[in-house]
Image (cartoon, rainbow, N blue to C red):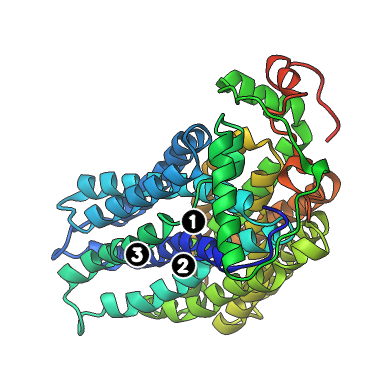
Amino acid sequence: MDRLPWTRFHWLIVVGLGVSWILDGIEIQIVSSMAGPLQSADTLNLTSGQVGAMASWYLAGQVFGALFFGRLTDKLGRKKLFILTLAIYLFGSGLAGFSWNMWSLFFFRFIAGAGIGGEYAAINSAIDELMPSRYRGRVDIAINGTYWGGAALGAAASLVLFNEDLIPTHWGWRIGFFLGPVLGLIIIFLRRHIPESPRWQLTHGQAEQAERTVDEIEAGLRKDGVVLAPVDDSKALDVVDAQRLSYTQMARVFFGRYPSRSFLGFTMMATQAFLYNAIFFTVGLVLIHFYDIPANHTGYYFFPFAIGNLLGPLILGPLFDTIGRRKMISTTYVGSGVLLALSAWAFSEGILGATTQTLFWCVIFFFASAGASSAYLTVSEIFPIELRGQAISFFFAISQGVGGVLAPFLFGRLIGGAENANPDRFPLTVGYLIGAGFMIFGGVVAWFFGVNAEGKSLEDIADPLSKADSSADAVSDIEAPARPQ
């Protein structure tokens, strides 16, 4: 798989697996714009607190879905799960459009969140295992970054859906929930043509199926005129059937065998989650309370913010494969942290306007978005294949639990007194400095603990637990002292 050139097969993977992040971005942005409509007496008549709780239920679903489906994708395979999780996500999203009261809406949002939480594990695992090693970094980072392309589209759609002159209030919010399922039906069709990961098959007692999968991929490439070099004998790998690990054994792999990599994964995921949730969920509040932007105009400022987030992974992504993981992760994390600290000073001095504040956010998240996407890439490639899905889901769940819950609450409290005529900027300035410190810390950790995984086969980065000459040591003797990282 690593010796393959870039072909139409790889574009199928990019489109079939990557579009789900676009759908997620579209929906999240539309839903975030529903606060007004959902509080209308013509709809569900929710309070502000209940609207906020809707996001919490979605987040809780993501955490549950990541942990539950992450384990299943390592047990049952990538293909089964990336079709199942997308179907659950689209099912829950579509049902939300039929909600008849607050609790039905919460329940359906939980289901949708569970689906997208499972997507994180299944999709990133499949991408890394199907992509040639020299393209793996840029593709994974770019696909994770396409969320922001969807968010920009969602912002545009919300200007139409929630315009009472165009669509009645009691219909606009329901249509917003239906957009994802309609588009997602096409994606499920595409995913049917994406093969199972031969790496997963090989390590789960399906050697013949793995050979057949690779043969079919190579036959399709040769039909297009691609000449493939023979596989070097040095790449041969003997494996035995993978054993299903208990949670205790998993913990020993993560923290006994790979303690520094686990520390790296947690730090990267948690720090980027804190920064993103802190800024993303309070952009509108800052514009309204500190820059006197009307609530129905904040969407216009979101466009450049989303575009900056989209361009970062697309432009910087290839550098993670050429300059290298450790250097680029450190640069993007530290760079975004320093820029955030600089913007905090400018904000506290009152020298920024709504436009210049937005420009600052664009530049900050140009770097932060590439760094955040590299966090998912990192945790999906530095652990053995048998635990890849569970590694992604484990660190995702922890980071969302820490950054996803703490950051919006903290920053919301810091902005809480901003309704005054002259709101105090000091508390929010401190919050920005805390976020900057976390990102800089994440960059420093990446510099000292990062893994130079660029251009390397996944098996060279971490031995499969089912590798014949090390399987007994990897599984039965997990309590042995950790090997060098």
359 lies above or below 188: below
Give the number of the mark in front: 2 or 3: 3
Q: Residue at x 42, y 75 (%)?
A: 153
Question: Toward which corner of the image does residue 471 lie, by quadrant?
Answer: top right
Instruction: Tell whether label 3 touches label 1 (CB within 8 Å).
Output: no
In the rendered structure, find residue 186 and report the number of the disc placed on it. Answer: 3
Mark 1 lies on residue: 412
Q: Amino acid at mark 2?
A: Leu
Q: Nearer the viewer, residue 394 or 184?
A: 184
**Above-or-below relation of 482 to 331:** above
Q: The residue under label 1 is which amino acid type?
A: Gly
Circle 2 is placed at which residue position? 285
Comparing 259 with 361, the one in front is 259
Q: Answer few, some or many: residues within 10 Å of disc 3's Cα (few below 14, many 20 plus, some between 14 and 19).
A: few
Give the distance between the C-alpha atoms of the residues marked 1 and 2, in whole angstroms.
8 Å
Q: x and y percent of residue 372 in the render?
A: 64, 57
Measured in 3D between alpha carbons, the distance from the residue under mark 1 to the one under mark 3, in whole angstroms, is 38 Å
Where residue 10 sits: x, y (%)? 58, 63
